[in-house]
Amino acid sequence: MNTTHTYTVCEECRKVNRVEVSPTSGKAPVCGHCQAILPVKNGISEVSATGLKELVAKSPIPVVADFWASWCGPCRSFAPTFQSAAQRHGGVFVFVKVDTQANPLAGDLYSIRGIPTVLMFKSGMEINRQSGAMPAPMFDQWLEAAKSP
Ligand SMILES: [Zn+2]
């Protein structure tokens, strides 16, 4: 089986790191620059607003960001769909989650009006966004649409 790689950002030094989607070692990946533990698990990074900004600017592949909060029911119901997509499309898109409760400024920075909202960034620019919990087939279609140039 081929190893799939994705990208994540170090919340300590802001360096973008290339990591395995499913690390064979089972260990949490660390930053190649400062050795801090990277905020990535099962192919999804939990990032801050500044971490997302850095990742969007530096990632060579499109970034899909799920803005969510633990108190939000639709966000929790969308989480398995997002997780499944992160496993299946790991090498094609970078999957990140932004906890709007832990990062209250993130919602303002990206003009998020309701959660969950999923944003798609390509070459440093937002190219699409969708509010509300998408059913899995719809989310897959949404991702596929972003693959075409
Ligand atoms: Zn670092």
Image (cartoon, helix red, strand yellow):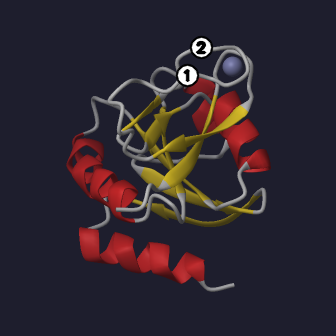
Residue drawn at x 55%, y 31% as measured from the top left: 47
Residue 102 image point, x, y percent: 48, 20
Image vertical order of residue 137 relative to residue 48, above or below: below
Q: Residue 30 carries which label?
A: 1
Residue 55 image point, x, y percent: 69, 42
Q: Residue 36 carries which label?
A: 2
Q: Which of marks 1 and 2 is nearer the N terminus?
A: 1
Tell me the kind of residue under disc 2: Ala
For this rendering, which residue is in front, 8 or 116? Answer: 8
In this picture, residue 87 sits left or right of residue 96: left
For this rendering, which residue is in front, 35 or 69? Answer: 35
Residue drawn at x 71%, y 48% as measured from the top left: 56
Q: Is residue 132 visible?
A: no
Q: How many marks?
A: 2
Image quadrant of ligand 1?
Answer: top right
Q: CA gap, disc 1 to disc 2?
A: 5 Å
Dot 1 and dot 2 residues touching (CB under 8 Å): yes
Residue drawn at x 34%, y 54% as measured from the top left: 82
Residue drawn at x 77%, y 47% as measured from the top left: 58
Q: Is residue 117 visible?
A: yes
Q: Report which quarter residue 81 is drawn in.
A: bottom left
